Image (cartoon, helix red, strand yellow):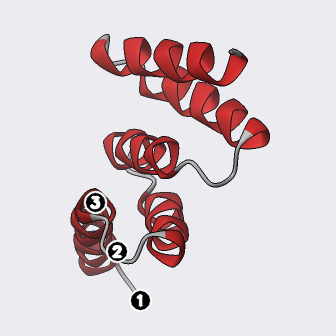
Amino acid sequence: EKFKRLKNEGNDFVKMGEYEEAANKYSECMKLNTEECTVYTNRALCYLKLYKYEEAKRDCDHVLQIEDSNIKAFYRRALAYKGLQVRKKNMPGI
């Protein structure tokens, strides 16, 4: 199945530290299945590694709408909020 193959390719990219490529694979997965929570939490992880906190938060919010007790989504969203706060603190003139 194409979905599984893309997800596995994404996972392999994560293991190699290629977060941009991994995020792209997970995005392709989402076009095939929008209800699969793991690809969203996986992509959120990639976004966190790329300092894209807003995008990570959005993916986690999406998962929590489907699965309101998803621990990974809660944890990664917390990391995203933390990243956003640190960024806000470090930005001059805001």
Residue 68, x across and y down, in percent: 39, 77
- State left or right for residue 74 relative to residue 41: left
Image quarter of the C terminus:
bottom left
Instruction: For marks 1 and 3, give the CA distance.
Output: 25 Å
Name the mark on residue 75. none
Decide which of 59, 82 is in the foreground and name it.
Answer: 59
Q: Which residue is mark 3?
A: 76
Residue 4, x across and y down, in percent: 57, 20
- State left or right for residue 17 relative to residue 20: left
Q: Residue at x 43, y 27 (%)?
A: 19
Whether label 2 touches label 1, CB < 8 Å: yes
Work out whether 67 lies above or below 92: above
Q: Residue at x 34, y 72 (%)?
A: 84
Circle 2 crowding by C-alpha within 10 Å: few under 14, some 14–19, many from 20: few
> Mark 2: which secondary structure?
loop
Q: Which residue is mark 1?
A: 94
Disc tally is: 3
Instruction: For marks 2 and 1, give the CA distance.
Output: 6 Å
* Residue type, mark 3 in image: Arg
Q: Which residue is mark 2?
A: 91
User: Disc 1 vs disc 3: which is toward the camera?
Assistant: 3
* Residue type, mark 2 in image: Met
Give the residue furthest to the front. 1
Work out whether 88 lies above or below 59: below
Residue 36, x across and y down, in percent: 56, 48
